[in-house]
Every structure is written in C-alpha cells, then in structure tokens.
Amino acid sequence: MSRCREHPGRKAITSELGGLCQECYDQVRRAQSTVNPFDHTGIVVKVEDVKVVVKEDGQDVEKTKQKILIQHCSSGQGRVATDDFDRHFGGKGDFYRL
C-alpha cells in the first residue's frame, strides 16, 4: 500500500500523483505547477468540482471530483494550451507549490 508523501500515516489515493492522500489532492489550487513524467511543466490555472457517477456495490453513486486545468506550452498543439490534467496528462504528475 502506497503512503502519502506529506502525511506518511495516510494511504495515498494514487501513486501516479506523487503519492498524495485525498486531503493533499484536494488542496491542489491555482498557481501551483505540475510536472508530468515526461518532464513537461505547466501551471494549474483552475480547479473546479464536477459531479461524476461511479458504481459502488452495483449501484450508481454520484460523487464530486476535482477537475484540474493545466496551462502549458504544447509543441503538439503549436500553442500555449489549457488542458484537463486527467484527460491530457493521464492524471500523472507531481504537484509543487511555487
């Protein structure tokens, strides 16, 4: 079981996010940078709560999830782009305070 790098007594919700517990992940805010495994750096420009439906014990349950938007220089898109962290970066990378 992976442990949170900030709170060693807590279980990390995902090792791909640098081993953060739910509380640490929820604290990601604007003006923090993120580095994905491909050495690509961007700035967190928006964090918003979105409703998602997940299956729990065979039942549909509505939960709130954070959507993190990252602004980064994208050679593939040929511009400075703003992309969803989970979708564009696969939800993988470490967050650092500036």
Image (spheres, grey):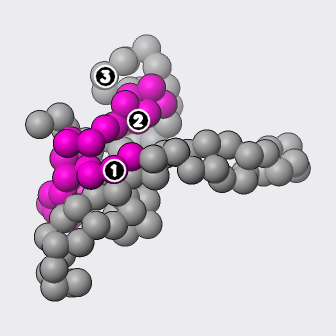
The Cα atoms of the two marked residues, 1 and 2, are separated by 14 Å
Q: Amino acid at mark 3?
A: Glu
The Cα atoms of the two marked residues, 1 and 3, are separated by 23 Å
Q: Amino acid at mark 2?
A: Tyr
Which residue is the site of mark 1?
Answer: 46
Identify the mark nearer the N-term, 1 or 3. Answer: 3
Q: Position of residue 84 (x, y in %)?
A: 39, 63
Q: Residue at x 43, y 33 (%)?
A: 26
Which residue is the site of mark 2?
Answer: 25
Q: Which mark is residue 86?
A: none
Which residue is the site of mark 3?
Answer: 6
**In this picture, is 14 found above or below 7?**
below
The magenta segment: 22-47
Q: Residue at x 18, y 65 (%)?
A: 72
Identify the mark nearer the N-term, 1 or 2. Answer: 2
Q: Residue at x 46, y 52 (%)?
A: 67
The Cα atoms of the two marked residues, 2 and 3, are separated by 11 Å
**In this picture, is 14 found above or below 10?**
below
Residue 2 visible in the picture: no
Check if residue 43 falls in the magenta segment: yes
| Residue furthest top in the image | 9
Is residue 56 shown left or right of residue 50?
A: right
Residue 85 visible in the picture: yes
